[in-house]
Image (spheres, helix red, strand yellow):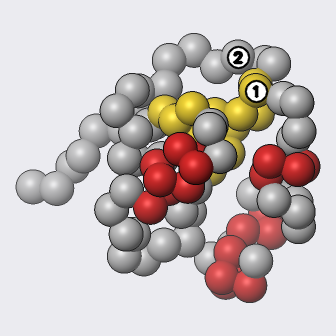
Amino acid sequence: QEALEKIGGKAWMVHRHAEPIERAFEGQRLVYLTPDAEEELGALDKGSVYVVGGIVDRTPAKGLSVRRAAGLKIETRRLPVTDRKS
């Protein structure tokens, strides 16, 4: 949480929870957003909770958020963002 505050996270329009996501949203459909997901996110579903993984990572560990989601049996999607490294 401290790292998120350092980059202006208090101003973001998101809900934060101190408890683990599997407890905070028990019984709800979760979608873990991660750049390592195989499938791209399509239309948003109002009945789903979207979890943003690795938002404050400066050097993200490849596959970390996908493995976490798999361990929790949560589906994953990646945002439709084009890589502009050129």
SS at badge 2: loop
The quarter of the picture where the N terminus appears is bottom right
Q: Amino acid at mark 1?
A: Arg
Compared to residue 83, the image places residue 85 above or below, namely below
Query: Looking at the picture, how far across and down is residue 76, in whole percent?
Result: 52, 35
Query: Looking at the picture, how far across and down is residue 83, in whole percent?
Result: 24, 46
- Answer left or right for 27 relative to 60: right
Residue drawn at (68%, 75%) of the image = 4
Circle 1 residue: 29
Q: Which mark is residue 45?
A: 2
Separation of marks 1 and 2 at Cα, in angstroms: 10 Å
* Residue 33 in sight here: no
Compared to residue 30, the image places residue 70 above or below, namely below
Looking at the rendered image, the disc whose residue lies closer to the viewer, 1 or 2, is: 1
Residue drawn at (71%, 33%) of the image = 30
Instruction: Kindly indicate whether the residue at mark 2 contacts the one at mark 1 (C-beta within 8 angstroms).
Output: yes
Q: Amino acid at mark 2?
A: Asp
